[in-house]
Amino acid sequence: MIDQILPPEVAATEAFSDPPDVSLFPEEEEAIARAVDKRRREFSTARACARESLARLGIPPVPIIRGPGGAPRWPDGVIGSITHCSGYRACAVARTRDVTSIGIDAEPNGATPDGVLRTVSDQAERTHLATLAADEPGIHWDRLLFSAKESVYKTWFPLTGRWLGFGDASISIDRETGTFTARLLVPGPVVNGSQRDSFEGRWIVRDGLIVTAITISGGDHEPPG
């Protein structure tokens, strides 16, 4: 599913259930030592996906622990992103020589909880969502918007090392092409010698799930200090 919205230089693995026999590194076990069962299953399956994706790049198994800002800490020369929601876990990785940053997110294709949409969107975005919903009511566009903004943050943070609020990017979704544009409302990162004022992403809705992804090609971006 997620392969359909990622370029070929990205290695992605997804899972729709939790295998019972995932082995974790000691550092990973320590990170979830006090986690409830649901969190442990999400974490473990996501790490299994990560190791399979890394293997496709020829990289042996390594612990994947959280770094600054909660982002996964990847081996040298690798950039990646992890997501999980009910019934779905996925990881996407690439060599930094090929890809500068990746952000993926998955959500159930259901309405956002009360109050969330107003928190994460502005009036122009909500008007845009209403138009999309009128044309295709089977998709929960509010949830897709939320997912797109999560992918924006996951793409942004490795480039900047800084927080990005939901109101710091404005999303426009193209229903026909399965793409979206995130216009940054704060100064964007410098990528491959140019300041970015927007990110381009893709989305797919299938089997009760919404998945979004942003990939910035190029490579060898100097990470923030």
Image (tube, rainbow, N blue to C red):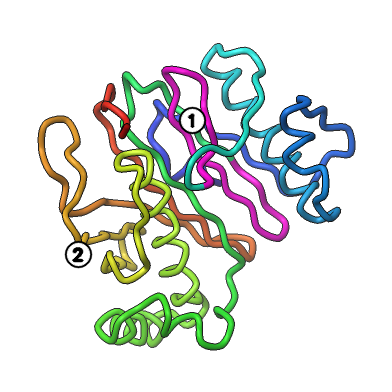
Residue 113 x/y as whole percent: 58, 82
Query: In what element is the residue under mark 1?
Result: strand
Q: Is residue 187 above or below residue 107?
A: above
Residue beneath disc 1 = 93
Q: Residue at x 45, y 18 (%)?
A: 76
Q: Is residue 55 above or below residue 153?
A: above
Using the image as rendered, state which of residue 62 and residue 46 is in the foreground.
Answer: 62
Q: Residue at x 72, y 39 (%)?
A: 31
Query: In what element is the residue under mark 2?
Result: loop
Q: Residues within 10 Å of mark 1 (few under 14, many from 20)?
A: many
Is residue 207 covered in magenta?
A: no
Are discs 2 and 1 less than 8 Å apart at CB? no
Q: Is residue 63 above or below residue 19?
A: above
Total marks shown come to 2
Q: Residue at x 84, y 39 (%)?
A: 19
Q: Is residue 163 above or below residue 67?
A: below
Q: Earlier in the sequence, mark 2 or mark 1?
A: 1
Residue 12 x/y as whole percent: 54, 34
Q: Residue lying furthest left in this view?
A: 194
Q: Residue at x 34, y 58 (%)?
A: 164
Q: Is residue 44 left or right of residue 113?
A: right
Q: Which residues are magenta?
A: 70-90
Amino acid under disc 1: Val
Residue beneath disc 2 = 185
Q: Name the front one of labels 2 and 1.
A: 2
Query: Mark number for residue 5?
Result: none
Is residue 85 covered in magenta?
A: yes
Amino acid under disc 2: Leu
Quarter of the figure that contains the C terminus: top left
